[in-house]
Image: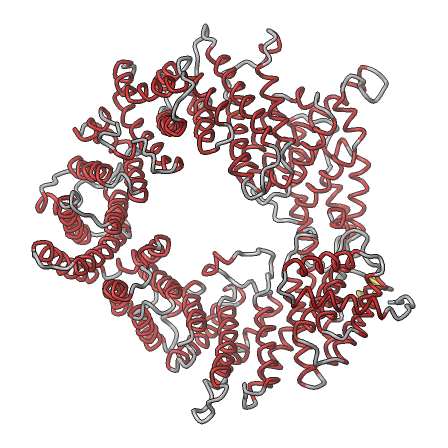
Amino acid sequence: MKWRKMADHVQGLAQLEILCKQLYETTDTAVRLQAEKALVEFTNSPDCLSKCQLLLERGSSSYSQLLAATCLSKLVSRTSNPLPLEQRIDIRNYVLNYLATRPKLAAFVTQALIQLYARITKLGWFDCQKDDYVFRNVIADVTRFLQDSVEHCIIGVTILSQLTNEINQADTTHPLTKHRKIASSFRDSSLFDIFTLSCNLLKQASGKNLNLNDESQHGLLMQLLKLSYNCLNYDFIGTSTDESSDDLCTVQIPTSWRSAFLDSSTLQLFFNLYHSIPPSLSPLVSDGGEKQTGRTHAALFLVLSCLVQIASVRRSLFNNAERAKFLSHLVDGVKRILANPQCLPDPNNYHEFCRLLARLKSNYQLGELVKVENYPEVIRLIANFTVTSLQHWEFAPNSVHYLLSLWQRLAASVPYVKATEPHLLETYTPEVTKAYITSRLESVHVILRDGLEDPLDDAGLVQQQLDQLSTIGRCEYEKTCALLVQLFDQAAQSYQELLQSTNSSAADITVQEGRLTWLVYIIGAVIGGRVSFASTDEQDAMDGELVCRVLQLMNLTDSRLAQAGNERLELAMLSFFEQFRKIYIGDQVQKSSKLYRRLSEVLGLNDETMVLSVFIGKIITNLKYWGQCEPITSKTLQLLNDLSLGYSSVRKLVKLSAVQFMLNNHTSEHFSFLGVNNQSNLSDMRCRTTFYTALGRLLMVDLGEDEDQFEQFMLPLTAAFETVAQMLSTNTFNEQEAKRTLVGLVRDLRGIAYAFNAKTSFMMLFDWIYPAYMPILQRAIELWYHDPACTTPVLKLMAELVHNRSQRLQFDVSSPNGILLFRETSKMITTYGNRILTLGEVPKDQVYGVKLKGVSVCFTMLKAVLSGNYVNFGVFRLYGDDALDNALQTFIKLLLSIPHSDLLDYPKLSQSFYSLLEVLTQDHMNFIASLEPHVVMYILSSISEGLTALDTMVCTGCCSSLDHIVTYLFKQLSRSTKKRPAPMATDDRFLHIMQQHPEMIQQMLSTVLNIIIFEDCRNQWSMSRPLLGLILLNEKYFADLRNSIVNSQPPEKQQAMHLCFENLMEGIERNLLTKNRDRFTQNLSVFRREVNDSMKNSTYGVNSNDMMS
């Protein structure tokens, strides 16, 4: 870089040094903020670049060097007004020389400078100077570091490690397509060489006696391991898998890397490193021993992380013989670690080793594992390791997931193994099952005694482990069942004795309840693991044994609920009932099952109806005694809801006297959770909707057209509405009580409305609520618009009432109810919308709850009513009714009050907005066309941003909306050219706006084309529909875009790319008729396939991607 000649700004430099010190060292917040403000101004100043060099050259503190490095990173990263190529090359060379001549900089300064080098290299990857890709000679750049001292060597390796990481990370300031092109090119041109270099240096290191006390040796080893890990953890094919899918991960190593993995030395290198890193210092050296152990563990952790990645190499990299050989070496290495588990007492290393074990089965088949020479010995060692791990339940509880997933996969594979070699799982799986069950039971006493955190409180973790155990426990089920029966009988007997004894302590009772809680959860899980095709009569009889015991325990605990109950045990019971329902109740279940025979013998439950009566009895008992316990109430109601969904079970349920009791007595007197309790939160009433959905389904079975029965059922709700009406009619009323009564009522009604999906029953509900009670809902919105806990349930009820689910909203020919219902909807949207906008600026952390959630429900409501097909919207303008205009104008006002970023940041809001926009552009395009220019541009911008949204639903909705808009434009243009010679119809504002701003449509054309060509386009058909219209409206721009894409290809591929575009438009006429569109969609499928094939081997950049920067 030709740095400007500068006078020695000593004073300015000293001032910057003071500011840096204040920013990084002061504890005074005001001083730090002042310094930060001044330094931000410095970063944005025009002479920032020259001052950064001055700071690096003459700055006396590490903080000023850090400031210079971070400022330079910002300068090279900016997308507007980027630095010229020569300047960036000079900065790159300067940074390399600076690092080479100052190897002993503060670690954070070195890190920041390496980050700067990596950023320049990544962003300039496709920059050419005299036909040379100037930023690609990365290995040459670091070679001089690797040939110098150990300090230099560490810097060189860190540069490669940081660069690999930087190129692998997508950033938000540049398009994803550009990131993928750089990442793919780096993968093809440099990554394998870097990995090979890393392995060679590691081989040299492992050949020596490693001394981790030596700072430089430790530093070099750590950086080499990080580099190897970054290479193996590279996103080779652009899938960007998230961490949550970790255990399903396959490393998509390129075929060109085969040699490194066919040669077992790469795999052996990491296993050898594991064993050559000294476990700890000798006892004689006490000082620094802890530091040494920490270093050892950190190094071993990285070795294991690399092994996890190597074990996950895609299967298709090998043929069968090669895979068997690779697996043999892998299993052998695992066996050596199991035989010598020196580092595993460290929780992180233990966790990583458990991940390695899990990969053995996620990537290889049981049929392949059993053929490995040492398989019997290895499976024994893994079983012992698992049993020991489960017994030490308090150590690294999160790692157990990987061990259980290994055994779950092994057990699930047993029926499919064709190999003749014994898999021995019938020997070891019961040991694992037993260890899990007994260790959980033994943990109860210790947790209570020591006041530890109870794993039963982490419902997600428990459920995950039970899901895994359900498969493991079904392997050799006789043994599992015998163990559970034995343990359950012991625990239940002890529990009974304690309850009958007069001098038993509460702690002893709690311990037994804890043990029974685990057993009930586990019994539910193993019953839920039943697979119909693999199950036998004997196993069903065993299920019967287990079910009988749980039901007997339930009878015992229910009889004591008046005095005391155990919340965790009740939740376990509900989990058991849920599993039992899934497997043994419903339309698909064999009623001759041996389970029912066992229930009949022991408990006198002869058929499914009697079993259902037990379910309903339990549900009513829970609602009676646990009405104030939200977790139990919501899970109980979910069980009732699930039972009400089955076609045959719901008909059997209705015949039960207990269900009839519920249908006739759904009041707070019998079900306390329906009470308006001043202590509870308004949001705690959500479970009422679930309750009434289930009741609604049960009521509908025999309701038919019986209005008297319906009126009878609605009596409690009628009384509640009358109470609210009474309150609102007076000036002085208890506002909190009115709110609670209303919120409970509308939640109940929403449940009923959701359940009534047939015309007859829904019309009864509609006639009940309209017109009598609709004014109360409108009044509530007027009064409490600022309280979302009150307005959201009311708005959601209205959205449900206008939703034409299963064509239930069908009014008679002479009925004006459709129009009247829309008027009420319009009134509610307008009332809420105009009032919520008076709130002004809402803090960012509250904006969704206070405003956007309600707005989102309004959008959903408007979409439902506009697409319900029960209102003719043409009549409103015809008869001078402003209901439609009011609703649409309120929609626009609400929309303009929301920043674009919020539309995509909140998933529910984006889904409701884009689905509404789709309906508006389809059926109300004249309204869209009549809007002010700034509103039209806002809507078009939101479509443009939505096209690249991650949510496929949003993206598809945008494509559909864009298609309607483009089709409308195309028709208007065609019409205007036919009627008069002028190209623009003077009376069409929309056409005029579009001709004033052609860049908007052009940008969307380039976006759609980019997504189709360069990205993983999951909704290709939807993308193809607007594309033809966009091309026909912008033929010249499309031609330029096509030439740009063709010219950006390597010379030998340009002809093929040109041909792809020619074929795309072959046989396409200048119209948007369905036949023409379908042909274009077919052409586009072929086009996308051919372009992808053509570009697969290309490592060149596609400059047209930059049009999206």
Mark yes or no: residue 595 visible: no
**Residue 68's spot in the image, x, y percent?**
76, 67
Eyeballing the image, is 983 above or below 309? above
For the residue pair 849 and 358, the one nearer the viewer reads as: 849
**Image quadrant in which you'd find residue 839:** top right
The N terminus appears in which quarter of the rendering?
bottom right
The residue shown at (46%, 77%) is 329
- Residue 632 versus residue 412: which sits nearer the camera? 632
Q: Name the one closer to the observer, 952 or 375.
A: 952
Residue 723 falls left or right of residue 286:
left
- What percent of the width, then of the height, locates residue 854? 51, 31
Asked whether the viewer can see residue 811, the reply is: yes
Q: Is residue 293 left or right of residue 431?
A: right
Q: Hey, which quadrant is residue 627 in on the image?
A: top left
Q: Position of residue 680 (x, y in %)?
A: 35, 38
Check the image and report above or below for 245 versus 1020. below
**Up-down relation of residue 233 to residue 715 (above or below):** below
- The residue at the point 56 percent across, 88 percent down is 207
Name of the residue lying farthest toward the bottom: 284
Query: How many labels, in total?
Result: 0
Whether 266 is drawn above or below 614: the answer is below
Front-most of 993 and 181?
A: 993
